[in-house]
């Protein structure tokens, strides 16, 4: 079993991590465990999870509907109500088993239930393994505004077992892969150059890549736990990507985008902005654009779409005094944060960067 030490907790890898989790749970002498999952994971992942979890602590399972549209305060209220009815007290703990929606929502519930109880995370998607596993960000959406309500609250343990990835469709794997590519783009050129051709990747080595992504994110977060500075580079692709994702969530006629799909589009756009503002070379931008467009579908955006997406940008948590701040690439493997960006340039990026050539 491999372990990466994060901010006050371990990220443990492999099937043996379940044994480690069981030992910790038994040592803590919890009154009750609340296992939070969704309907998909309850069917596909829970049998494996329970079969590999050696604990004598009594538990109850709370199941919610899957999907970003259920990551909201209404679901939080229903989960807390269910916990009260099940007799969860201040000596209880939450175990999340699921993707980022479950780990984000479950972590938030744990941070506020009776002013805070312990939380243990078992991410079951590639995205949640490489992203939600480190950093202690919890939260829910308000309407279509992503992660508007949340806390920084570290779990007691995260276990990462790639066996859960066997339950995923290809689109879900590609969604998580976008975050891995992002880690290379902002911090590790060699890692990015290794990942850039997904067709050449041996997915038998996926645990090694996941560990590397977790190590990259952990190295950044350990220097800036509350996102006051350096940690902001982890938002590369997310300023515009989140706005695109929120816009598609809010419009019933638009196809809902997976998080990684929206972030991949955001990375092309923000790499283009990096280039036209003199940070990133055109050669590097063209490489990034070609790579991402070979993996992810880039939808067409009308002028009306772009105008609506620009409106969503005003909700970005990195903004200050109404000014949009963006992460730029200085090179492949290096990024800067708190870059002010004009909406006219963002509009230009939509019009030009997603085409087969750059003007």
Image (spheres, rainbow, N blue to C red):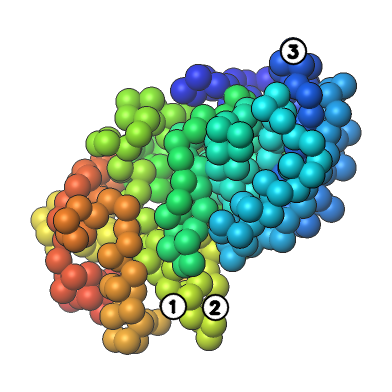
The residue that mark 2 highlights is 255
- The reply to whether the C-beta atoms of the residues labelled 1 and 2 are less than 8 Å apart is yes
Q: Which residue is drawn at the image coordinates 40% and 48% (left, top)?
A: 182
Say which label, 2 or 3, has the lower sequence index.
Answer: 3
The residue that mark 1 highlights is 299
Count how many numbered circles sit on residues in the image: 3
Horizontal and vertical percent for residue 186?
32, 43
Label 2 crowd (10 A; few <14 / some 14-19 / many >=20)? few
Q: Looking at the image, is 307 positioned above or below residue 264?
A: below
- Dot 3 falls on a residue whose secondary structure is helix
The residue that mark 3 highlights is 27
Q: How far apart are marks 2 and 3 (CA)?
A: 47 Å
Say which label, 3 or 1, has the lower sequence index.
Answer: 3
Q: Is residue 117 left or right of residue 141?
A: right
Q: Which quarter shows the N terminus? A: top right
Tell me if residue 303 can be seen. yes
Label 1 crowd (10 A; few <14 / some 14-19 / many >=20)? few
The mark closer to the camera, 3 or 1, is 3
């Amino acid at each position: 079993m491999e372990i990466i030490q994060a901010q006050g907790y371990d990220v443990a890898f492999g099937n043996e991590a379940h044994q480690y989790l069981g030992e910790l749970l038994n040592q803590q002498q919890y009154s009750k465990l609340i296992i939070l999952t969704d309907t998909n994971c309850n069917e596909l992942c829970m049998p494996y999870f329970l079969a590999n979890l050696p604990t004598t602590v009594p538990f109850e399972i709370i199941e919610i509907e899957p999907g970003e549209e259920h990551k909201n305060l209404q679901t939080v209220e229903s989960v807390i109500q269910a916990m009260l009815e099940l007799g969860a007290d201040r000596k209880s703990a939450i175990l999340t088993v699921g993707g980022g929606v479950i780990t984000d929502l479950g972590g938030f519930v744990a941070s506020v239930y009776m002013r805070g109880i312990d939380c243990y995370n078992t991410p079951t998607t590639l995205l949640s393994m490489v992203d939600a596993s480190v950093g202690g960000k919890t939260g829910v959406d308000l309407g279509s505004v992503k992660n508007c309500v949340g806390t920084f609250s570290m779990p007691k343990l995260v276990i990462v077992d790639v066996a859960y990835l066997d339950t995923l469709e290809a689109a879900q794997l590609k969604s998580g892969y976008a975050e891995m590519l992002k880690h290379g783009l902002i911090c590790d050129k060699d890692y990015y150059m290794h990942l850039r051709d997904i067709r050449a990747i041996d997915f038998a080595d996926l645990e090694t890549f996941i560990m590397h992504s977790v190590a990259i994110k952990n190295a950044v977060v350990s220097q800036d736990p509350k996102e006051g500075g350096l940690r902001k580079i982890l938002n590369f692709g997310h300023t515009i990507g989140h706005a695109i994702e929120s816009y598609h969530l809010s419009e019933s006629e638009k196809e809902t985008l997976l998080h990684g799909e929206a972030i991949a589009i955001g990375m092309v756009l923000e790499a283009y902005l990096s280039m036209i503002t003199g940070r990133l070379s055109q050669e590097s931008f063209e490489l990034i654009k070609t790579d991402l467009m070979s993996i992810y579908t880039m939808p067409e955006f009308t002028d009306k779409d772009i105008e609506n997406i620009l409106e969503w940008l005003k909700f970005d948590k990195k903004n200050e005094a109404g000014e949009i701040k963006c992460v730029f690439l200085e090179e492949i493997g290096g990024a800067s944060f708190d870059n002010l960006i004009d909406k006219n340039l963002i509009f230009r990026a939509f019009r030009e960067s997603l085409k087969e050539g750059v003007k």
